[in-house]
């Protein structure tokens, strides 16, 4: 089922066209990545989809609710957004209060608030964080808490702006696994932006952006075959992927590898 539909959105900043008739649809319960080069207005896209920046050119619908002035509250209740300026998004001093914050604004009862709170804390396995102050959190802990506060009211869409760039490879894997946990348990669709191909391994719904247009929409396996288009879009192909593809061409390996040690082990056999 389509949960978000975007039709012909265009956006300009200082007469500079950022998006040009951008159209796509998002299925319910899926993880979707928008990948482009750095400084290519990925944040602007997230803000437009969330309604933070209002765009009256084109049409955006979530859960059959069109984003406009009349429907703004109905639309935004179906959306949660995490922007990349992490520290500016915390509203409370304590982690528990931060996670519950949106439920207070939505006037949840104390009983329902506590129920939802316990559920997301257990779902994301952050029991060890709830008694901390938000200023004491590491970067990955901040991301986990923001994820919890963003999904506690079970939105239809979770928008995430380039958060993975703050993390090392192991932390990125951990957060990507949390994306799967959220989608599988809440049926929330996730849209996240990145400039790193390693962040979208195994995904089926990847959109490659160049000059405000979608130039590819496919699975990871198919997208990495188009290295010329990726290069033109300013997206760097990771060294191990490039190397293993060349080795595959010469019959030295039979698949794409992402880990250096795996390639070394295969070549030494």
Image: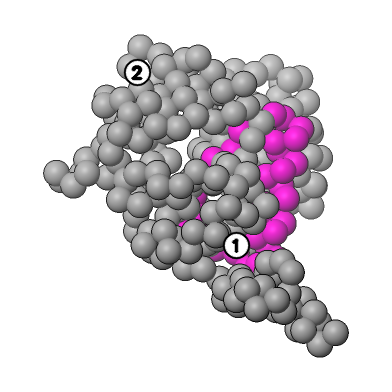
Tell me the element at label 1. Answer: helix
Residue farthest front in this picture: 250
Q: Is residue 170 magenta?
A: yes
- Give the label on residue 39, or none: none
The percent position of residue 227, horizontal first and vertical second, equals 48, 64
Q: Which of these two is toward me, 186 or 34?
A: 34
Residue position for label 2: 68
Give the quadrant of the C terminus: bottom right
The percent position of residue 228, horizontal first and vertical second, equals 43, 64
> Can I make out residue 99 in this image?
no
Q: Is residue 235 left or right of residue 266?
A: left
How far, Cα to Cα, is label 1 from label 2?
A: 36 Å
Between discs 1 and 2, the one toward the N terminus = 2
Above or below, 82 against 40 in this view is above
Please tell me how crowded label 1 is: few (under 14), some (14-19), or many (20+) other residues with Cα within 10 Å: some
Above or below, 231 against 180 in this view is below
- Quadrant of res 249: bottom right
Q: Residue at (74%, 69%) from the top-left corner?
A: 254
Q: Is residue 24 left or right of residue 259?
A: left
Residue position for label 1: 198
Q: Residue at (59%, 28%) from the top-left corner?
A: 27
- Quadrant of res 97: top right
Give the quadrant of the N terminus: top right
């Amino acid at each position: 089922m389509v949960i978000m539909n975007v039709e012909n959105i265009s956006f300009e900043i200082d007469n500079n066209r950022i998006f040009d008739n951008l159209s796509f649809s998002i299925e319910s319960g899926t993880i979707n990545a928008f990948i482009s080069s750095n400084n290519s207005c990925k944040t602007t896209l997230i803000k437009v989809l969330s309604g933070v920046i209002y765009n009256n050119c084109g049409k955006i619908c979530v859960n059959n609710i069109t984003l406009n002035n009349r429907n703004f509250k109905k639309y935004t209740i179906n959306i949660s957004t995490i922007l990349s300026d992490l520290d500016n998004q915390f509203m409370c001093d304590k982690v528990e209060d931060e996670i519950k914050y949106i439920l207070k604004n939505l006037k949840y009862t104390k009983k329902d608030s506590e129920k939802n709170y316990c559920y997301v804390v257990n779902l994301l396995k952050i029991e060890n964080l709830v008694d901390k102050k938000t200023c004491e959190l590491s970067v990955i802990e901040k991301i986990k808490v923001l994820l919890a506060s963003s999904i506690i009211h079970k939105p239809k869409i979770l928008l995430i702006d380039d958060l993975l760039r703050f993390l090392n490879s192991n932390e990125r894997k951990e957060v990507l696994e949390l994306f799967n946990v959220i989608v599988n348990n809440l049926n929330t669709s996730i849209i996240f932006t990145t400039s790193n191909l390693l962040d979208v391994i195994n995904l089926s719904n990847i959109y490659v952006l160049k000059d405000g247009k979608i130039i590819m929409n496919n699975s990871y396996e198919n997208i990495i075959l188009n290295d010329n288009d990726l290069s033109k879009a300013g997206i760097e192909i990771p060294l191990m992927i490039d190397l293993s593809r060349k080795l595959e061409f010469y019959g030295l390996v039979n698949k794409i590898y992402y880990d250096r040690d795996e390639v070394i082990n295969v070549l030494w056999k």
